[in-house]
Amino acid sequence: MRWLPALSLLPLALLPACSSGPSAEELAEQEKAEMAAALGVAVARIDEVDLGLKTRVRDNIAGHAALQKRHLWSLQLDEVELRAPAGQLVRARVLRIPLHEPFAGGTAFYAFDREGRLYALGLSGEAFERGAHGQWPGFLAQFKGRRAASTAELPTPVAAFRITEAAEADPTGEVATLYAHHRLMAENVARTTQVLTLTGRGEIPSSDLLRDWAARYAGLRGMASQLEPILGRATAAGYDRHVVAGQEILAQAAFAASAGQAGEVRRLVGGELQRSSCQACHQMDSPRTGGPLQPTLAASLTERGAPPLYRVGHDVWAPDGREQEAQYLASLTKAALLLGGVLQEEGRL
């Protein structure tokens, strides 16, 4: 008779209990928590639905967005109920795209509402957890609210390239000026989101960050004269005044940051800057339409056949030193919007 292993002679009660791992309910809650943290909005329900996209369509979109085909191989579409800040449930379709280098291991989430607009977007993964001093939430903020099909207007990437090439060949032309203005405005949105993200979790933004922002804000002053043919002399002068007011507020915010006053920084950037500079400028009447100024400037690009290009340094702002990573995320967002446009066209968004 062979000897049995000593362990087999132990009473069952003394054997270590086997762990079955998280339950299905726990995994579902973890999934909702991850999506909610990325999108910045509570998630009440997630149900996976059939994506139904042909491989050819995915590959074409990857090429149009300057991505590799493998970047769009693994996609997931979910039917999701999001709980809006007011408490009501919002139905959305969320597209998940696994991230590749330089953010391998993370996931991008794109939530589309019933009208096909990008309701919310966000990133999950170790690279984005409290990383980059709140820069990535600010970077993504410049894409929110664009229509899903907005990047599908150009039939080929060559058309986009030719528009960019023409703008760069004539840096004093109106298209180049409008693209540069769009990029500077995108930076303002990104910096505002960055500061509010930091102060919202009790951190104080660097005073150097705010001084640098104030210096870059000065770039908008140079825009006033360049935009005069579009805005008219009186509106351009008013634009300049609002930019000066913004610079002064940012200087005050930098002083408050150096004094460790996170609440004052938040009040100045999230309140005073928006009222006295951003909103005041956007609400000026356009001499061409009689309506608010900001939609007129956006329409001016469209009128000149120059839609969003999602190109870092041209019409997209990027954190300093992170241009390569930013271009990957900008291209991925362009692809997500194209995918959303196709899904909406096919009645599956």
Image (tube, helix red, strand yellow):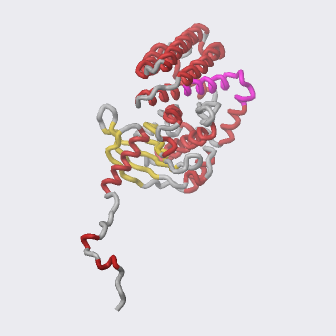
Q: Majority secondary structure of the magenta segment?
A: helix
Can you give x and y, in whole percent of width and height, for residue 134 in the image?
49, 33
Q: Is residue 272 above or below residue 204?
A: above
Q: Is residue 345 visible?
A: no
User: Where is residue 229, by image quadrant?
Assistant: top right
Q: Please give the range of residues in magenta.
A: 166-187
Query: Is 62 or 317 nearer to us in this picture?
Result: 317
Q: Is residue 160 visible?
A: yes
Residue at left offset 68%, top offset 33%: 164
How many tags in the picture? 0
Can you give x and y, in whole percent of width and height, for residue 321 in the image?
63, 34
Locate the N terminus by quadrant: bottom left
Most extreme residue toward the bottom is 1
Q: Is residue 108 above or below residue 138?
A: below
User: Where is residue 41, by image quadrant?
Assistant: top left
Q: Is residue 243 magenta?
A: no
Residue at left offset 50%, top offset 32%: 138
Q: Is 233 positioned to the left or the right of 148 in the image?
A: right
Can you give x and y, in whole percent of width and height, for residue 275 in the image?
44, 15
Q: Is 246 positioned to the left or the right of 31 in the image?
A: right
Query: Is 66 or 326 nearer to us in this picture?
Result: 326
Q: Is residue 168 magenta?
A: yes
Query: Is 255 or 36 nearer to us in this picture?
Result: 255
Residue at left offset 59%, top offset 28%: 302
Q: Is residue 242 above or below residue 125?
A: above
Query: Is 236 or 328 nearer to us in this picture?
Result: 328
Can you give x and y, in whole percent of width and height, for residue 216 in the image?
60, 21
